[in-house]
Each structure stands twice: as structure tokens, then as C-alpha cells.
Amino acid sequence: MDNFVLLSEGFSLSLPRQIVIIKSNNQNMMKNLFLTFALLGSSAMLSAQATIKIPKVYQPVKKSMYHKGWIDFNKNGVMDVYENPNAKIEDRIEDLLGQMNIEEKTCQMVTLYGYKRVLKDALPTSEWKNMLWKDGIGAIDEHLNGFQQWGLPPSDNENVWPASRHAWALNEVQRFFVEDTRLGIPVDFTNEGIRGVESYRATNFPTQLGLGHTWNRDLIYKVGRITGREGRMLGYTNVYAPILDVGRDQRWGRYEEVYGESPYLVAELGIEMVKGMQYNHQVAATGKHFIAYSNNKGAREGMARVDPQMSPREVEMVHVYPFRRVIKEAGLLGVMSSYNDYDGFPIQSSSYWLTTRLRGEWGFRGYVVSDSDAVEYLYTKHGTAKDMKEAVRQSVEAGLNVRCTFRSPDSYVLPLRELVEEGGLSEELINDRVRDILRVKFLVGLFDEPYQTDLEGADKEVEKKENLEVALQSSKESLVLLKNERNTLPLDISSIKKIAVCGPNADESGYALTHYGPLAVDVVTVLQGIKDKVKGKAEVLYAKGCELVDDNWPESELIDYPLTETEKDEIDKAVADVKQADVAVVVLGGGQRTCGENKSRSSLDLPGRQLDLLKAVYATGKPVVLVLINGRPLSINWADKFVPAILEAWYPGSMGGIAVADALFGDYNPGGKLTVTFPKSVGQIPLNFPAKPSSQIDGGKNPGMPGNMSRVNGPLYPFGYGLSYTTFEYSDLQVSPKVITPNQKVTVTCKVTNTGKRAGDEVVQLYLRDVVSSLTTYEKNLVGFERLHLKPGETKEVRFMLDRKDMELLNAKNDWVVEPGEFRVMAGASSEDIRLSDKFAVVEYGMNGVWSETGNSKGDAISASTEMQDVGMTLDNDLKTCWQGNKGDYITFALENGAKIDGLSIAWKKENTGEADFEIQLSGGGGQFLTVYSGSVSKFNEWMSYTFKGTTASDLRILLNSDGLGVAEVKINQLKKE
């Protein structure tokens, strides 16, 4: 008899007799359950699995249907066009569509949610011939993937594992639709897969945010190949990935699911992921969430995913950009329509978004599936439809192909049929929607090979060694070194006898076992990774120190509750370990309680008592290393100021503990770079990349009682930032040609040298600035990146190719254009660490490559109220040349970011050498200049130095208060470099 374990009131789970769970409190229950299931292993059989022998090769039952090279889906004894593998896909679609009745057509337009979600049966039963899906079904979602509900352990159904049994079970379900429906239309088995295909077991990758931090196109392609291949071997034909949302507000719960904040980076990685997943049409990839989904008002989640506060141009430049490129360049076959609105129009009922843009402009040829209750929300939330039938009509007219939610398919199909019968929707419109669905099914081969017959191959493919090696590489390359003062890292194991490990995430594995990915794999925690790494060399002491959150969280982010005696005791245990040790590794961050779907926050600080634990450990005086495992950027200001070494790991997947330990002890040199921005405070939000000029600075620059500073400025860590155990030098930037027409390309090259003593990775980033444009454009746009591995002393050349898409802007007429003018190219190690800069010009076609540059060789570093062509003369080291103006004229110099200036030198020039008056002014941004020095000029053609009270400024201005005064040369140490 099986043992039964009480999970929660009213729910029990049957487990094999050899599995024992020790009773624990509710807070640790889920962790113990997940660990229990992980103990089953890839070769274990869940209860009752031995009752059916799984063959090596699947064989369907009705042999008479299956002919050499084709299948008689409609059982009429002849090869119809839609059954002919050699016929054109569009001809096959039209032939099948012509044979379908309205019942069969409407059934294709809905998803049946899988086992224990809506469908009560794991395998077909006799009752199915009386259910709605007796006429077929468009898709079955998440069937037997192991996920039951949020907060419950994976399913114990015998068909979820091993992989061969799972594939056999999906084949049995597919056989019902092929053999027991009139036309035999196969079902599209859909599933989640943003960190590996969601299954009881599969190759487990970092979350998409972690994958983004690898900046590695080739690696993401491999992740896609594995996700698609394992999905198909398990029996799935459509995987809901990648997420093409762009991160903008770090409070958002689903920040863990985005690649980053740059639309260019999201597009580049999204293209590779889709190409990998859809390789040889092994599965269809469905990108989500379309559109303008990731920046809802206040970053709120749940029912409040509405009213994004964005301008139309920002939506186009940031949120539309990845979808447009991935659809056009990678042939994305699926799009999930989001349930938010934009500018008052729900996306789900918007023909503008689902038809005009998606299909008309971008040529999308796949099918649109709704996200959860997107259809229902039209009348239950948005109030733009009076009832369900009206919501169905609006959705289908807008462009929806398949409704997918956790409800009976009847709730959608029956009103859909009523609308057709009543004339509310035309059958021709239904035909258009069904064509797209059938096209995807034909493309992924469902009408040629509806079954995954290689059952033995499924066991060999899923989680095979080669796949796990890619997962480990992903975990390693996602790591970002945020701080490494005095070369605290890597740790020297030869000088360490005891290591104290503490923190709520040190021995946590739940971050790798959540929804949308593999559910019950073996996870190496950071604690285990460290133990394995130092086994036989050093002793590891462990105390948790505190929980992820406290009993009053999240209210404790507003009210400073005193520590309880229990909390004090837990911190004291960790401190006692640290006092015995040579070094402390503190593992903090977030988890399923603080981040994820429906988990937006009102703070970005470390939750609960984590900062109290960190401060107590630091107070021991022992070296401290902070490891962060989290799903969003955190405002770790105290840690950044005091803790010598900080390693960001995100949610690093099942191999995360190995990757972190390798990095801590120097067997791997972390080289990831931030694809997101770390605000210092939640009060700075929105603070992100890309941003408009001067949009993220504010207030005065001088802190303290006598100062004028009213808020903190700048990020804690900017986009693109990341350290290494070695150093890199950039050189030899080349831009060619220097003058192009709008449709020509520009080649940019530079060299990067590893100048340190360790091998390491450098992510070379290329940014572009449209210097003068008809509309305000972003200060820097990411237009290229390349991750390089360099041995000590090794030099590599990086080559980037810029084309029209990198230079375009959406002009006042809403046309994408490349405007003539100057473009600044910047190569660097982050968005703020620019190492090299150059420029090129765009001219109208027919100008014969002619570009007339002004005398301003410093580009936008200098501007003036008059005689703009002469401003460069103030920096040409020639006292004979000058910029000259009259009373009221001025010349302005841009300063380096965060520059604190207290003086400069000027060489004046004047034909009439009588005294002349001037002022020196400073600006902290926003165009307001304050005078910091007033004086008279009595000496000319020689250097004069001027000092004033030091302050932080963005621009310095020399204002003339006399006529005919010239500025021959200026020396400003903090002058902005190109």
C-alpha cells in the first residue's frame, strides 16, 4: 500500500512506499515536497507506472488508416490533397477547410486545458466521444506536464514520467483525435518553456532574465534547440516562449522573465531562441505577451495589469521593436495576445494590433492565442463588451485564432457558434482564423507525423549529458560580478580552513522548480555547490540566519518592526559560525514569495531580515562575500558601500550552485553584464535603459545641510555593467565609410585585449546616438554586442555592421526614416563606461557622399549661441584662433557624467584690449544655469585660471557681458569625451 502525505486541508497525495516525508511546518512544506519528488530521479517510476509496458517505438491502433508515406485522416480510402505530404501547404489547408463543418471549425478555435486543469482525464475515455472535442480541438495545453496549481507539488500521475511514458500518453490522446474524429485533425499540444520545457523533468536553465545576462546569441540558440527538441520528444508541438516583453519597471513581478531593458538585446536574443526552437519545425514557438504588457500602471500585477503609462512613440521604439523583428527575421509561428489595454483599447479586441500591425505590416502567418482570461476580461474588467458573447465577437473580429484559458472550451465555442448562426460573425471570417491554425499544424508536421514514435529516444534525449552541459554553461555565463574590492574574489582555498555559509537562499532550490519550466529536477544549491567544491580542503559551517521574508512582510517595508527573539537567535547562530570561519558567504535575494507572476513589489530593498543578517555578519570583521539569487534588480546600497565582494546570480537554474561555487573559487571567471538597471531607490523609478537625454537626473548636486541636493541621482549599477577577475583594454576603433546614404551600411571595428593575468570574457557593447534629430531620441541606443573569451595577453578584433534599422527614428508623420546628419558611435564596457568613440554622417542619396563638417571637432561636447562653426577652435591648442561673440552670447561645454568641477583655465582674445566682463555658469541639467564666478578680463593671449566653490555639474557655460570678446582656448579637466 502507498503512503499518504497530508499536503493541506482536503488534499492528499499518493506516493510510492519507499518515499518518506518528515512532517514540517507550512513554510518549509513546499521545499520538502519538491526535494522529495526530486529524489525519484529520472529512472524512478511514479506509482502504478509498472502496469503498462512502454514499447521502444509507438504504434497506432487502426492500421488501415496508416499508409506508406501518408495517413488517411478522413478514413475515405483515398489520398485527399490535405493528406498528401507532397502537396503545397496552402492547397492542403484549402482542401481540408472545404471539408470541415462549422462544428469542426469552431472547435479548432479553442484550447482544452490539460489534466487536472480543465481536462479530468489523463488518457481518452469513452466519454470523449460525447464531449465537445468529439469534433476535434485546436490545442491541448500543459497536458501531463506535471504542473497542477500554484502552491501544489508536481502531479503524481503515472503518465508524467519517465519521458517515454509521457510521450506514449500524449500519443494516446493524439490517437483519439486522429482515429476517432471525422476528419482526423491532429491536436496542437502546447506547453510552457521559458527556462526549459515545462515537464516533470527536462533540462533546467536559468530564468530568462539570467539567460539575457549571458549576452551570448549562440548559447541562446542552443537553449532554444534543446527546449524545442525535448519538447517534441515529450510529445509537445508548440512551446510558449520566448517572452519578448521589455523590462521597464523593476518593481514588476515578472521582471525575472524578461531578457532585459534594451529592445535591441531582447530582439537579438529572441531571434536566436526562436530559430533554435523552430529548427526544422520541431515545434512552433509562441512569443508573449503581445503587446505593451510589461509596463502597466505602477508595475501592478494580477487584475491590475492595465493602463500602461507610455507614449505611442515609446511603445513603438521599445515594446513593438522586438516582436516586429522576431516575426520578420525568425518566422515566429505563434503570438500570445495580452490582456492589458493600451491608450484605453484592450489589445484582445484591437484589430489594429492583431490584424493591421501583426499580419498586415509584419506578415505574421501563424496563429494568435489568448493569454488566460484576455477574452473574458473584455466584459469582466475592461467593460468594453457587455457579455461573453460580445467579447467573443470582438476578439475574433480583431484577429484572435485560439482562446486559451482555464475554463471549459464550451464556454467559448458555444457562443461562437451562436454568433455564426445569428450572423454576428461570417463563416468566411471563421475560415480565415482556422486557416492560420491549420497552417501551423501543417508546418510542424502534424499531418505527416502526428505521433512522437521514438519513445526510447525520449528517455535518451531529455536531460541528456550534452544538454546539461549547455545548462551549466548558461548558469555560469549569467553570473555578474558587481563588486570586488581589494580582489576579495576569487577565494584562495589553500588559505581557508573554515567557510561560513548563511542566508535564506544558501540552501534554497525552489527558484529552479517554479511554473513555466521543469518542475522536479535535481537542484544543486549554493551551499551544496560550495561543499562539493571544498570537500576535503575546508570545513563548511551553515546556519540559515533568517527567512526570506518576515512575518509582517511586506508591511515591514513600511514599518520598522523590532526583531523577534526567534529572529535574533537565528542571526546569532549565523554570526557564531562566521566568528569561527575565515570567510563568510551570505546568500540573499528573492524567491517565489517575493518575485514572479502576481508578485510585484512596493520596494526594491532586501526583504525581511536579510539586511539585518548581512550587517551582523559584516560586524564580525571577517571577509564577506554576498551572493544574490533574485528575479529583479535590488537596491543593495548598504551592501555596495560596505561589503567587499558581490556576485549576482539571478535565478541560475538547477546547476546554479555549481556555477556560483566555480566563480567564488576562481575555476570560472564571471563575465556577464547587466541587461537591467539597478536603482538606488524605488523612488527613482522609472529609471531604465534606454533613456532620453537628461531624463534621469534631477535636483542639486551638493549633499548635506548647506547643499542643494534633494534626491539621489544615477543608478547603483548601470545597464551593461559587470566586472571580471581580469582587465580589458579597447583600441583601434575604425568606422567605415564615414559618409553614407540612408540605405547603406557602416562597418565598425575595434580591438580588445586581455591585459590581466586570467582568462576571461568581455562583452563588448556598441552604442549609437543620433546627434541632431527632428525629435528627441534616446541618449544611447544599443546597436551591437559581442561576448569574447580572451586568454591573458590575447587580442581580438570585433566587427559590427550597422544598417538602416539601427539609425531609424519614427518621425512626426509616424514614418520610419533615417534623417541626414551626424551619428556618434560609442564602444565600451557598459552604457556608462565608453572606451572609444567616433562618428559618421548620413546624407541624402544623390549628394555624392559629400558631408560638410563644422569646425566643431568635439561634436556635441560644445555648443554656442552664435558662430557655431568656430567652437572647435577653443580646443585646438592654437592661441591665434578663437570663438568670438558679443554681450549676451555664450559658449557651453558638456562635462563628464558626475563631474565635480571647481575651476578652469581660459585664454582670451580681443582686438580692442580694453577690459571685458564675463561670467562662468554651471548647470546640473534641465537647462538652468547658475553663476558661480563673475569677473573682468584684463590680460589676453595668455592663460588665466579661475576657481570657484566645487560642485557637481553636467555643463559649464562662459557668458560674455561685453562686445567683441573672444575665447581662444579653454582647459577643462572634466570635459566630456567623445
Image: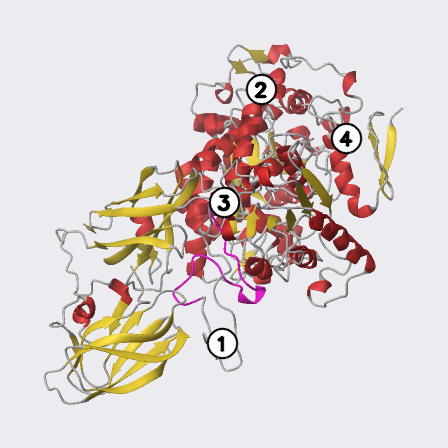
**Closer to the camera in the image, 19 or 174:** 19
In space, the residues marked 4 and 2 are separated at their CA atoms by 34 Å
Instruction: Find residue 73 and name its label.
Output: 2
Amino acid type at circle 1 is Met
Q: Which mark is residue 709?
A: 1
Which residue in the structure is indicated by mark 3? 213
Residue reaching furthest to the right: 1
Which label was assigned to residue 156? Answer: 4
Given this view, does label 4 or label 1 mark the residue nearer the observer? Answer: 1
Up the image or down, 614 lies above or below 184; here it is below
The residue carrying pointer 3 sits among few (fewer than 14), some (14 to 19) or many (20 or more) residues within 10 Å by Cα, namely many
User: Which callout, 1 or 2, points at the residue further toward the start of the chain?
Assistant: 2
Identity of the amino acid at label 4? Asp
Find out whether residue 679 is within the magenta segment.
yes
Mark 1–mark 2 distance (CA, rounded to whole Å): 74 Å
Instruction: Compute the Cα span from label 1 to label 3.
Output: 34 Å
- Image: magenta residue range: 671-695
Quarter residue 562 falls in: bottom right
Magenta stretch prevailing secondary structure: loop
Mark closest to the chain's N terminus, 1 or 3? 3
The residue at the point 75 percent across, 54 percent down is 571
Q: Is residue 847 left or right of residue 98?
A: left
**Secondary structure of the residue carrying numbered label 3:** loop
Closest to the camera, between mark 1 and mark 3, is: 1
